[in-house]
Amino acid sequence: MPRPVFTGAISFGLVLIPIKVVAATEDHSVRFHQYHLQDGGRIRTRKVCELDDREVSQGEIGKGYEISRDTLVAVSDAELREIPLPTAKAIEIVTFVPYESIDPIRIGEGYYLEADGTVANKPYTLLRKALERNSRAAVAKFAWHGRERLGLLRVKDNVITLHAMKWPDEIRSPEALAPEKVDLTDKEVDEAVLLIDSMTRAEGIEGAEWATDRYTQALEEVIHAKAAGKKPPALTAQAPAGKVVDLMAALEESVQRAREGRGETDADVHELKPKKSTAAKKTAAAKTSPKKTTAKKTAAKAKKASKPRRSA
């Protein structure tokens, strides 16, 4: 597991739960270095004092806030640690809400909260079970990296997770981005709904299909080929088609492709009803035929029995 990014406590009313905060995600992106095209030399970023005109070490660097061009207020790390704010040392739970009530666009990076020591096990488990039982998420405040933040606590696989959240004023309004009003037919909307149904996965997004970053794989192939002095693999993906003229035709074709991707065809879908109808007719015929035959035989016997016998 990675190193904790924060050590403190969860403040739950009067209950304190010592915890360690560990990053819940990893970045597997391919990293590039900058280099000089002329001679291949590495391009590096160095910290240079503009007054001394020399490179300085990390131990010589402090923090400061520039009030004006000539005025700088120095703030030490010790002063930042001692800021008179309850959330500077604890993740303070403020309220509880249904998880569905939180706009997903406000949810940021995720962390795992680990119980810190044996004494934390019982209150940690208590909070976890309480969250699970009433299907709630906790909204908290905490101070990291130079500012107070909002957080969302929920349960995942018996572990309490913390999601950093954006403040309301950090979310841009999307109103100006909405398209102008357009006319759509009910048939077009119905076909779009059918396409959504055709592409829906009841099992969610678990599995190998959702565990592969194809861009990173392709990029690694290019790097390995060039390192071996070989020609990089050719592009196999096709560019998206141009402007869609017939929206309905595009929807119908998309539905057809989605069905084919699941191994379905129009014939498979439409053959079901005739088969049931034919089977029903055969069953009905089988049930009614014996009755008709029996009735005819009975009538014939009765007619024969009713004829008078000729005397000798």
Image (cartoon, rainbow, N blue to C red):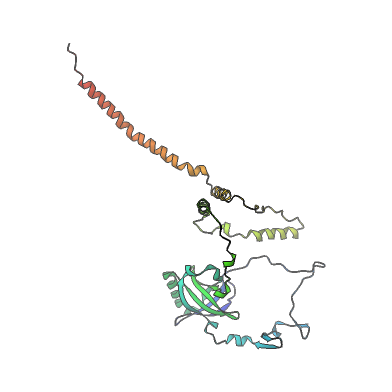
Left or right of 151? Residue 228 is: right
Q: Considering depth in this image, is 73 or 282 the residue closer to the camera?
A: 73
Which residue shows up at 53% across the image and 68% down it? 104
Residue 36 seen by the camera: yes
Please provide percent x and percent y for residue 188: 53, 52
Left or right of 111? Residue 61 is: right
Q: Considering depth in this image, is 115 or 176 the residue closer to the camera?
A: 176
Q: Considering depth in this image, is 121 or 8 the residue closer to the camera?
A: 8
Please provide percent x and percent y for residue 128: 46, 73
Q: On screen, 183 above or below 138?
A: above
Q: On screen, 105 above or below 218?
A: below
Please provide percent x and percent y for residue 75: 64, 87
Q: Assign the C terminus to one quadrant of the image.
A: top left
Q: On screen, 65 above or below 99?
A: below
Q: On screen, 52 above or below 260?
A: below
Q: Residue lying furthest top in this view? A: 312
Q: Assign the N terminus to one quadrant of the image.
A: bottom right
Q: Residue lying furthest right in this view? A: 38
Which residue shows up at 72% across the image and 82% down it? 57
Please provide percent x and percent y for residue 166: 56, 73
Residue 159 seen by the camera: no
Which residue shows up at 42% across the image and 37% down it? 278
Report which quarter residue 89 is drawn in. bottom right
Total marks placed: 0
